[in-house]
Amino acid sequence: MKKTIVISPADLVGVALTPLKKGEEAEGVVLKEDIEKGHKFALKDIKKGEKVIKYGEVIGRATADISQGEHVHTHNMATNLEGTLEYSYSKKDIPVSAPAKKRTVNVYERKNGEVGIRNELWVIPTVGCVNSQARAIVKQFEKAHPDAEGIDGCFTFTHPYGCSQIGEDHERTRMILQRMVKHPNCGGVLVLGLGCENNRMDVFIETLGDFDTERTEFLIAQQAGDEIAEGVKLLEKLYDKARHDKRVPNDMSCLKVGLKCGGSDGLSGITANPLVGRFSDYMASIGGTTVLTEVPEMFGAEQLLMDRAKDEATFDKIVKLVNGFKEYYQKHDQPVYENPSPGNKAGGITTLEDKSLGCTQKSGSGQVCDVLFDGDALTSHGLNLLNGPGNDMVAVTNLAAAGCHLVLFTTGRGTPFGGFVPTVKIATNSDIAARKPNWIDFNAGTIVEGESFESRLEALADLVAETANGSQTVNEKYDSRDIAIFKTGVTL
């Protein structure tokens, strides 16, 4: 196994793939101090103020003189980023990949022509006040149907919102819940309201758009004698329809896959993220769809994405996406570039550029075909960008609400989290994969142990196909299913 890596010939730093000791030789230099796994060391002397290069790109500047062989991290370097920027359109020629190996998946065909990879019953509260009632309805239904043949389970997704919100904040809550109601992984849904919330049921239905009336029921708790019993009756009605649904074969290109990372470490941009990027390119080659979000984790790498915009209109959307999110930070008097979390830093990520250049590896090398803002639905095959923060729970919720059937979630520190669609956790290192089999679905750490990207890509694509066919992810097995709605406004 290699002990170190230099990602690009232009780099001024190397990365430790295993813990290194002071006095060891690494990449032709003698280390002047211990270097933890995932952390950086200087390949040459770097003067104070000089740019630090990793991934062949600038990840910050030295805040002190750094000697060859020294540890390079938060104590001696900082971000170079500041404020909103002006960008120029310079389209990069991207070779079109030949169609890759095709796979067949077995999916549920929905009335509107969409497909789902699960056939679940959902109870969705319009307001947090009825969370307990939603849970009780599901519990009573499960008690009556311990096996529930024909469906993949009955679940509720509780949240604290739906009342005391105004303006865009309230509209986003309603929009996310409406997108869930119409998600194709759901074979039947009960929308449960209280009756006095500002997320009113009549307006919710009026603005819902086209939906399957045979698979959607609505209940206002204040108008029911026993809302639990009434809710169970409505679930029974939905179950009678959903349990007869059958999987049918379809090309894997029918899938829409979200791309997300969380709890990143110094190996994220070396193993799991570039592997997912190769998967994104694979999906584009067969006519499939992928979606990358976490806009703050594009800061510092945004020009690389802009250069891959399919046309100038898409470039303009990326500029709006990036600068719009910076303006959101500034509106709240928060620093735009203070992003790497304590866990990120402990794992070897120093600056936002360092994090972003690793994060955007998940986008692969293909064209950016479209950019989605609040309320936009997926319409373009290939790689899409989605507006939203880096927060794990919010980002996965946004990806699923945009129409993703499942999410690939890379992690170096580990997390048990799962969204309301299958959430495939991909370890960046073999240590976390071995220690947390109850969190991790797939190990990309073997890439630094000698296994090829090509081999792991085949295995990952097979896993995605198996997941689409009904194989449960770890978050599903352990019933880790949560939503979080992005809140930007005031609470009344």
Image (cartoon, rainbow, N blue to C red):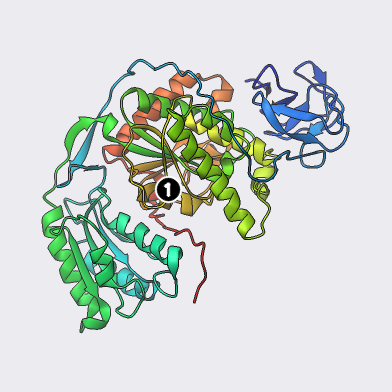
Q: Nearer the viewer, residue 264 or 144?
A: 264
Secondary structure at badge 1 equals loop
Q: Is residue 330 visible?
A: yes
Residue pictured at 36% horizontal, 51% vertical: 401
Quarter of the view holding residue 28: top right
Query: Is 237 placed left or right of 404 in the picture?
Result: left
Q: Nearer the viewer, residue 482 or 401?
A: 401
Query: Is 107 placed left or right of 175 in the picture?
Result: left
Name above or below for residue 193 compared with residue 50: below
Query: Where residue 231 sits in the image (x, y, percent)?
Result: 21, 72
Viewport quadrant of the N terminus: top right
Question: Where is mark 1, residue-wise?
Answer: 373
Residue pictured at 14% horizontal, 59% vertical: 213
Name above or below for residue 484 compared with residue 349: below
Query: Where residue 439 sits in the image (x, y, percent)?
Result: 48, 46
Query: Where residue 294 sits in the image (x, y, percent)?
Result: 52, 45
- Crowd band around label 1 with a 10 angstrom C-alpha radius: few (<14), some (14–19), many (20+): some
Name above or below for residue 124 compared with residue 369: below
Amino acid under disc 1: Phe
Q: Nearer the viewer, residue 490 or 104?
A: 490
Query: Where residue 44 sits in the image (x, y, percent)?
Result: 82, 21
Residue pictured at 26% horizontal, 34% vertical: 254
Residue pictured at 17% horizontal, 40% vertical: 247
Q: Is residue 144 visible?
A: no
- The extreme bottom residue here reads 225
Quarter of the view holding residue 68: top right
